[in-house]
């Protein structure tokens, strides 16, 4: 059974994916709220600095995984911040797994995006990568509970 922290994370990444699909942006307010919730809950559940350090390390891993893609122009800043927020919920090791699974989901999504654009006779633009992060998050949490 999934815990409250995981359910909150799922709600946040699904909201980010819906926003990215609808408006092509991940709201900063959503990401900041999620980060603050993760830090507050880790502080409260962990009795202080132990889990808070894990949350901060997870945010750092999430940020550093996708920051090079942003620097090269291959990803939007909202996606990088969303990955950092998701990492703050799961910690550094699962943030790494989440990043890898999100990259795999992103590759599959990119292929589908290209095929759909070609089928419509259009050019594929603006991949909503928050969808891939949501899929990666779901897969990471599902693997943690198998």
Image: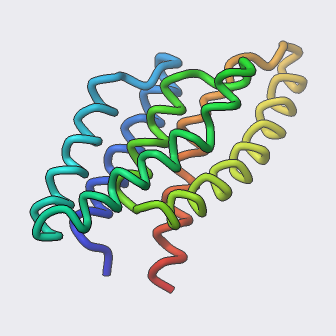
Tell me: 42 left or right of 139: left
Instruction: Work out whether residue 83 or residue 58 is closer to the camera in this orientation and state it.
Output: 58
Instruction: Work out whether residue 16 or residue 89 is closer to the camera in this orientation and state it.
Output: 89
135, above or below 140, in the image: above
Q: Residue at x 86, y 33 (%)?
A: 115
- How many numbered badges does the structure rendering display? 0
Instruction: Work out whether residue 4 or residue 97 is closer to the camera in this orientation and state it.
Output: 97
Outermost residue, bottom side = 146
Estimate the x, y position of residue 61 in percent, counting from the top left.
52, 50
93, above or below 122, in the image: below
Tell me: 44 left or right of 100: left
Q: Residue at x 53, y 33 (%)?
A: 80
Estimate the x, y position of residue 114 in percent, counting from the top left.
84, 30
Q: Residue at x 37, y 54 (%)?
A: 10
113, above or below 62, in the image: above
Q: Residue at x 47, y 61 (%)?
A: 92
Estimate the x, y position of residue 87 in percent, counting from the top left.
44, 52
Tell me: 65 left or right of 14: right
11, above or below 41, in the image: above
Tell me: 124 left or right of 94: right
Instruction: Work out whether residue 132 or residue 46 is closer to the camera in this orientation and state it.
Output: 46
Estimate the x, y position of residue 127 in percent, counting from the top left.
68, 27
Specify how the rendered protein is coloured: rainbow
Q: Quadrant of the N terminus?
A: bottom left
Determine which quarter of the picture holds residue 109: top right
């Amino acid at each position: 059974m999934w815990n409250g922290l995981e359910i909150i994370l799922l709600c946040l990444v699904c909201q980010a994916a819906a926003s990215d699909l609808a408006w092509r942006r991940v709201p900063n307010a959503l990401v900041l709220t999620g980060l603050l919730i993760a830090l507050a809950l880790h502080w409260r559940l962990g009795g202080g600095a132990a889990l808070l350090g894990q949350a901060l390390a997870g945010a750092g891993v999430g940020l550093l995984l996708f920051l090079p893609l942003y620097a090269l122009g291959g990803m939007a800043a909202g996606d990088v911040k969303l990955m950092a927020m998701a990492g703050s919920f799961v910690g550094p090791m699962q943030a790494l797994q989440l990043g890898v699974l999100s990259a795999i989901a992103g590759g599959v999504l990119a292929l589908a995006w290209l095929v759909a654009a070609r089928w419509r006779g259009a050019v594929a633009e603006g991949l909503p990568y928050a969808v891939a992060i949501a899929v990666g998050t779901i897969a990471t949490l599902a693997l943690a509970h198998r």
